Amino acid sequence: MSTSEQPIAPTAAPPPVRLEAVTVLSFDCYGTLIDWERGILNALDPWRKRTRLDLSDDALLAAFAEEESAQEKETPSLRYDLLLAQVAERLGRRFAAPLSDEEARAFAASVGDWPPFPDSAAALARLARHVPLLVLSNVDEASIRRSAAKLGNPFTAILTAEAIGSYKPDLRNFAYLLGFIAGRGWSRAGLVHVAQSLFHDHVPAAAMGIPTVWIDRRGGRAGGATPPPPVPIAPALRFADLAAFADAFEAARGRS
């Protein structure tokens, strides 16, 4: 059985997190560091206005979550900007309001324009003073380079779905992360993964034995641009934003 085919078992208690023992932090980017929900809504706004689509933000984000996840399963090796164009077509069919070619292209190219959360860049700069920072992201190389620049380029390495050939929550992505850690000679015992999405990140990371920290950007509200987790998951540590996590990280290590 390949890594990607291994079933994800229900995980009531993910591995514990010891912030004082962390030697490397990996991050999800979109939803955790970049406000992808605002970016998605902004990018789709011309289509919504043109078609006078009577749809709430929450309903549109929920539809995006379903269509994006389905497309990623169908075309796991398709580059993310091209995949977004397919998602745009799926949304148009779903609501009987097709996007124009120009609208679909603009949506596909919008990822690098999605805004960072206000606290992300400063918090990442603080964390980078202590340990290497990595990104494990579901997007393409070109798009995330633009996003990384908005975040101050604090990352030692950026690992993308384009390079891996699959999309989270596929376990191959987390196996790739562990392989990268091993290749650098870093101990996996010092790795903690930091993310917002329970579906894309926390459930598969727990299945791979990787401790996680939940940046709960939605304040406990279900829904948004990610599907619900397939099994119950209770991350060991939870923070409302990245600044609060950076505070706790520095306090645990006795440094400012």
Image (spheres, rainbow, N blue to C red):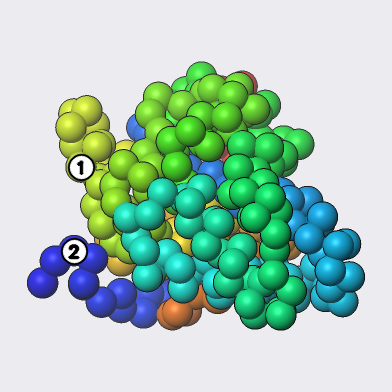
Residue 115 vertical placement versus 100 (above, below): above
In percent of width and height, residue 126 lies at 59, 24
The quadrant where residue 169 appears: bottom left
Image disc number at residue 179:
1
In percent of width and height, residue 23 lies at 36, 32
- Whether residue 31 is visible to the viewer of this picture, yes or no, is yes
Residue 172 vertical placement versus 146 (above, below): below
- Whether residue 211 is visible to the viewer of this picture, yes or no, is no
Report helix, strand or loop for mark 2. Answer: helix
Foreground of the two, 127 or 200: 200
Q: Please state which amino acid type lies under the numbered disc 1.
A: Gly
Figure quadrant of the N terminus: bottom left
Residue at figure coordinates x 89%, y 70% from the top left:
52
Residue, disc 2: 3
Report helix, strand or loop for mark 1. Answer: helix
Number of numbered labels in the structure image: 2
Image disc number at residue 46:
none
Question: On the picture, is 174 further left or further right than 49?
Answer: left
Question: On the picture, is 173 further left or further right than 150?
Answer: left
In percent of width and height, residue 235 lies at 49, 63
Residue at figure coordinates x 32%, y 55% from the top left:
77
The quadrant where residue 177 appears: top left
Q: Please state which amino acid type lies under the numbered disc 2.
A: Thr
In primary-sequence order, the first of circles 2 and 1 is 2
- Mark 1: few/some/many CA within 10 Å (<14, 14-19, 20+): few
- Mark 2: few/some/many CA within 10 Å (<14, 14-19, 20+): few
Spatial separation of the CA atoms under disc 2 and disc 1: 13 Å
Residue 137 vertical placement versus 225 (above, below): above
Foreground of the two, 214 or 236: 214
In percent of width and height, residue 173 lies at 31, 53
Residue at figure coordinates x 38%, y 54% from the top left:
78
